[in-house]
Amino acid sequence: MDITEKKYKKLSIQVSLTGLSFCCFDTLNGTISSFNEVLFDTIDKGIKIEDLFSDAFQKHQELNDTYDEVLIIHNNNLSTFVPTSLFDENYLGSYLQYNTKVFETDFFAFDEINTYNINTVFIPYVNMNNYFIDKFGSFDYKHANTILLSKLMDQSKNNDNKTIWVHFAPGYFEIIVIQNQNLLLFNSFEYTTPEDFLYYLLFTAEQLNMNPENFPLELIGNINFESEFYKIAYKYIRNIELIDVEDLRWNNYFSEAENRKHFILFNS
């Protein structure tokens, strides 16, 4: 690209079956210039996801602007991590079959997390990618958990305590356990009640011989002190806190709660 054509703008769009969120980055200053979230009404199952996307593009002019880079972030629980030493891109489906229902017709993709010699294997939303090809021509895409794990691995540097992070998404959450940039566990659990969350959290801790009196627990996503999920965990976990997003907030003017909820998108 000719430097005179460069816009110094990047668009990141995080997509899921429940909606999309997007933010525009000013790449010259490293700041987020705008952000929006679109929640889909999932009551009418007859509506195609492409039509919901079209509505969002009509309502939000930022999605129709010109950008130097476009990143699509696929947010689902159809992913797993594989050490680079054991990874072969010819067998992507076999890595996923242990924790995901895999079909012959599925399309598989992977992200490289080179810093930590890990690959994310995942099933992207092919119909969504096809829609964005028509809109943008070319773009990059990756899995939300690639960004999440990379940031948490960075944060765990020189911390010899086993730390549990929980990231809340609609209908499911991820439990991540890291000790000084060593990934010990990353798993996804579906939930409906706070008791579901507590059960999986305490069960995971027990499997890793982690004492609720000792281990640090940090919560990410759509979670706050008033949440029933926070309150029930607070009864059983001594060292619990919401993830510190002050470092993230320097590049945007959004609230602490918004930075916690959109931790993945804002870190993209």
Image: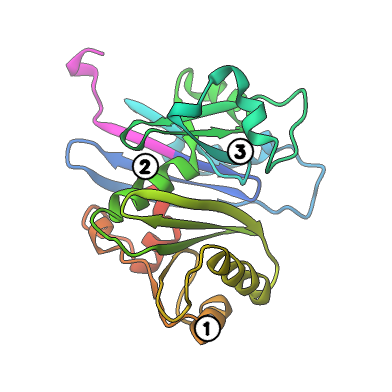
Asked which quadrant contains residue 216, the reply is bottom left
Image height of 233 relative to 243, above or below: below
Q: Nearer the viewer, residue 56 or 170?
A: 170
Image quadrant in which the C terminus is located? top left
Q: Earlier in the sequence, mark 2 or mark 1?
A: 1
Residue 257: image x %, image y %? 40, 68
The alpha-carbon separation of the residues under discs 2 and 1 comes to: 33 Å
The amino acid at mark 3 is Phe
The amino acid at mark 1 is Tyr
Does 111 lie within the magenta span? Answer: no
Q: Residues within 10 Å of mark 3 (few under 14, many from 20)?
A: some
Q: Residue furthest right?
A: 46
Q: Which mark is residue 268?
A: 2
Residue 62 horizontal side relative to residue 192, left or right: left
Residue 70: image x %, image y %? 40, 30
The residue under label 3 is: 53
Instruction: Please name which of the two marks, 2 or 1, marks the residue nearer to the observer.
Output: 1
Q: Residues within 10 Å of mark 1 (few under 14, many from 20)?
A: few
Image height of 49 relative to 109, above or below: below
Q: Secondary structure at mark 3?
A: helix
User: What residue is drawn where x is 29% and y is 33%?
Assistant: 9
The residue under label 1 is: 236
Q: Earlier in the sequence, mark 3 or mark 1?
A: 3
| Residue numbers of the magenta segment | 1-12
Instruction: Please name which of the two marks, 3 or 1, marks the residue nearer to the observer.
Output: 1
Q: Secondary structure at mark 2?
A: loop
The reply to whether residue 77 is in sight is: yes
Q: Residues within 10 Å of mark 2 (few under 14, many from 20)?
A: many
Q: Nearer the viewer, residue 228 or 87?
A: 87
The amino acid at mark 2 is Ser
The alpha-carbon separation of the residues under discs 3 and 1 comes to: 42 Å
